[in-house]
Image (spheres, rainbow, N blue to C red):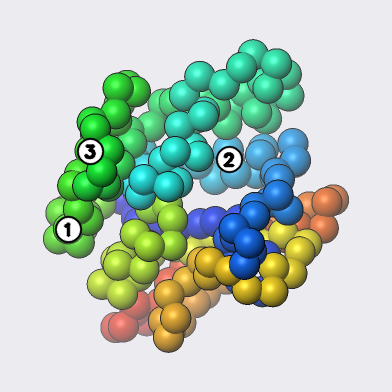
Amino acid sequence: MGRLRYGMMISLDGFIRDASGSTDWMLADEELHGFASAQDRTVGTRVYGRGLWETMRYWQSPPEEDLTAPEAREFAQTWQDTDKIVVSTTLAPPAEPRTSLWDRLDVDRLAALVRDSDLDVEIGGPTLAAHALEAGLVDELTAYVMPHLAGGGTAWLPAGFSTGLALRRQHTFASGALALVYDVVHEGDSG
């Protein structure tokens, strides 16, 4: 049985985009790429909404000059080696290998996917993740906190969402970014 994981690069004040829609401050250096690739080794399936899919599909065939750093090459290979599910009512079925289309996020279908998976499942993007969080399906939250204050914009967590967390791992990067990996404490969990 896998675990459902949700992680994003965020500003210190909890946004994935600032009020103007910019993510220019959200650049991962080689050290952060290496850390993220290590975290991703246990992910077998990634579930994306249309917007995040459009951003992440870049890793299917990035230009060779963008793969000079070993960390970038490893991240691309790790991404290509996972199954992808794109949740969208507006996209045609993706042509990329190992990629399928769901017309909506059915939390029961997602729960079955996680339960039947030998590896972890990662859900990406705040809209999809909100449904999974509110349904109590997310087992792990990872915040890659960037040294930036967005001052508003798109929040990475749904408004009013509350749950207990248990810190499992933290890492500070030379850039000033910080990775915080938490287990979600589900109702009835001991400890």
What is the three-letter code of the residue carrying label 3? Leu
- Asked if the residue at tag 1 contacts the one at tag 2, i.e. Cβ–Cβ closer than 8 Å, the answer is no
| Distance between the alpha carbons at the discs numbered 3 and 2 | 27 Å
According to the image, label 2 marks what residue? Answer: 38
Give the class, few, some or many, for how many residues have Cα within 10 Å of label 2's Cα (few <14, many ≥20): some
Residue 59's tag is none
Q: Which residue is mark 1?
A: 106
Residue that lies at the very extreme toward the front in this rendered image: 20
In the image, is 87 to the left or to the right of 153? Answer: left
Q: Nearer the viewer, residue 175 or 25?
A: 25
Question: Where in the figure is residue 115, as x and y percent of width and height?
Answer: 21, 53
- Badge 1 crowding class, 10 Å Cα cut-off, few under 14, some 14 to 19, many 20 or more, is few
At 38% from the left and 32% from the top, the residue drawn is 82
Tell me, yes or no, if residue 48 can be seen here. Answer: no
- The amino acid on which the numbered mark 1 sits, given as a three-letter code, is Asp
Q: From the viewer's perspective, tell me whether residue 147 is left or right of residue 136.
A: right
155 and 168: which is toward the camera: 155
**In the rendered image, which residue does mark 3 sit on?**
101
Whether label 1 touches label 3, CB < 8 Å? no
Q: CA distance from mark 2 to mark 1?
A: 29 Å
